[in-house]
């Protein structure tokens, strides 16, 4: 089972905090902290777009944790694309 986005966001923040490249991803990760699923909204932004932009800005995040968490986020995106 895929974890809620807010749990994933906490892990990302914990693992990436303090790294200079993280400043670009941080607004999207913080937005994810208020989302449970990709179908939720953050202001006028869809959960889908928040997760997409977070992934795009986490390209420099490397390692085992990064691979696992990015795969989870991609599963969230894929789930919406499949189920509509």
Image (tube, rainbow, N blue to C red):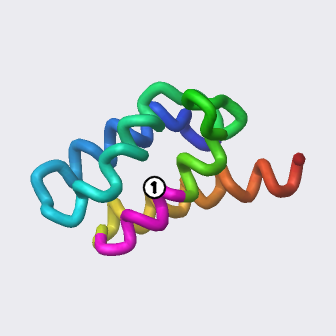
In the shown orientation, is residue 37 left or right of residue 9?
right
Instruction: Give the vertical position of 16 relative to 33 (above or below).
Output: below
Instruction: Give the vertical position of 60 relative to 77 (above or below).
Output: below
In the shown orientation, is residue 82 left or right of residue 12?
right
Q: Position of residue 74 (x, y in %)?
A: 61, 60
Q: Is residue 57 magenta?
A: yes
Q: Position of residue 34 (x, y in %)?
A: 47, 26
Tell me the residue at 54%/38% (across/down).
3
Q: Main secondary structure of the magenta part?
A: helix
Q: Position of residue 81 (x, y in %)?
A: 81, 56
Q: Position of residue 25 (x, y in %)?
A: 34, 55
Tell me the residue at 33%/36% (across/down).
10
Q: Quadrant of residue 13?
A: top left
Tell me the residue at 44%/35% (across/down).
31
**Along the line of sight, the residue nearer the viewer: 46 or 18:** 46
Crowd rating for badge 1 (residues with CA inside 10 Å; few <14, some 14–19, many 20+): many
How many numbered tags mark residues here?
Answer: 1
- Identity of the residue furthest to the front in this view: 44
**Along the line of sight, the residue nearer the viewer: 43 or 65:** 43
Q: What residue is pinned by disc 1?
A: 54
Residue bounds of the magenta highlight: 53-60
Instruction: Give SS at disc 1.
Output: helix
């Amino acid at each position: 089972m895929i974890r809620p986005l807010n749990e994933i966001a906490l892990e990302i923040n914990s693992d990436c905090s303090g790294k200079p490249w993280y400043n670009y991803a941080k607004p999207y990760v913080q937005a994810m902290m208020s989302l449970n699923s990709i179908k939720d909204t953050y202001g006028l932004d869809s959960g889908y777009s928040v997760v997409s932009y977070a992934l795009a800005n986490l390209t420099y995040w490397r390692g085992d944790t990064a691979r696992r968490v990015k795969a989870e986020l991609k599963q969230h995106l894929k789930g919406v694309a499949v189920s509509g």
